[in-house]
Amino acid sequence: MNQAEGKLQNKKETLDSRKPESYKIFDDIAGTYDFLNRILSFGIDVYWRKKMTKKLPQRKNLQALDLATGTADVALTLSKQPQIAHVKGLDLSKEMIAIGRKKVEKANKRGLISLDIGDGTQIEAEDESFDVATISFGIRNFSDPDKSLRDIYRVLKPEGRLLILEFSLPKNRLVRAVYFFYFRNLLPWIGNLVSKHKDAYTYLNESVEHFPYGKEFAQKMENANFKNVTYTPLTFGIATLYCGDKKDS
Ligand SMILES: C[S@@+](CC[C@H](N)C(=O)[O-])C[C@H]1O[C@@H](n2cnc3c(N)ncnc32)[C@H](O)[C@@H]1O
């Protein structure tokens, strides 16, 4: 291993060591999370979440599970779709869940959405209990994404579908250069300043650069037994939407 590779490996190990307790960072920044999401992504995150709902299975009465549900933006977006019967949202951060619950209450969706503290790598649910599972911008924070994928497979019904939205890196060199300037400099600076956290947005951004995306992440889904796995880059590849099914063909 040369010096550059060694440095990269050290960085990855430092980031990985923070993941089991990453939810504590979200406890600290929960109050400004939604506001910063909207301004730092220029509102594109709303469009990405809507794009995810377009891939819902075309069946009625869907039972949905939203892991790393945070402040419930995905749960609320899902609940607007006519084929959704119920959304269960799980997250390890009690502060994010508390804000999510207020939003659910305000939207008058208490009958449709339930939010609980829960680990995405060790899901407290019976086998084959959901028609669809979603995770948006959560799985890269999990201590063991492979374990989570296997557990999601377990709790999905046969014919169930997994939809994942996660950050990725643009392929085009010019877009990538502009993106890196924003992502490595401006975004962490604004994020840390507004959230008053010493390095939350530095960690969150660095974790993106060290997380597999595209074909490499799709392979992880296939390793967990998902079939028909697809990945669709969104907005120059800044984010990617993954889709996989629990079935035999
Ligand atoms: C970037 S936020 C995403 C929130 C939401 N899905 C969204 O799209 O805005 C990541 C979330 O993952 C949660 N998280 C981290 N590790 C987790 C785990 N092992 N199980 C469940 N949630 C976890 C954090 O608490 C945080 O709320």
Image (tube, grey):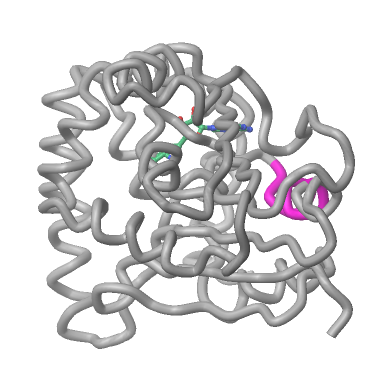
Q: Quadrant of the N terminus?
A: bottom right
The answer to whether residue 25 is visible is no
- Quadrant location of the C terminus? bottom right
- 161 left or right of 179? right
Instruction: Identify the residue at horizontal 71%, vertical 67% (top origin).
Output: 221
Q: In which quarter of the image is residue 163?
A: bottom right
Callout count:
0
Q: Is residue 134 above or below residue 51?
A: above
Which residues lie in the magenta part? 144-151
Q: Residue at x 53, y 48 (%)?
A: 84
Q: In this view, does 198 lie to the left or right of 187?
A: right
Image height of 133 relative to 170, above or below: above
In which quarter of the view is residue 32 placed?
top left
Is 189 within the magenta? no
Q: Picture coordinates of residue 179 (x, y %)?
A: 19, 67
Place of residue 180 in the rendered image (x, y in percent of width and height, measured from the top left): 21, 64
The residue under the point 19% across, 58% down is: 44
Taking 215 as reference, is 222 left or right?
Answer: right
Left or right of 224 on screen, residue 175: left
Towards the viewer: 184 or 154:
154
Give the residue at x 25% y 87%: 172
Q: Does the magenta stretch include residue 145?
A: yes
Q: What's the magenta bit mostly, secondary-structure-wise?
A: helix
Q: Which of 196 and 51 is in front in this view?
A: 51
Quadrant of the rendered image containing residue 85: top right
Residue 162 visible, this orientation = yes
Q: Where is residue 184 in the image (x, y as percent from the top left)?
A: 22, 53
Please name whichever residue, 54 or 235, is drawn nearer the observer in this view of the structure: 54
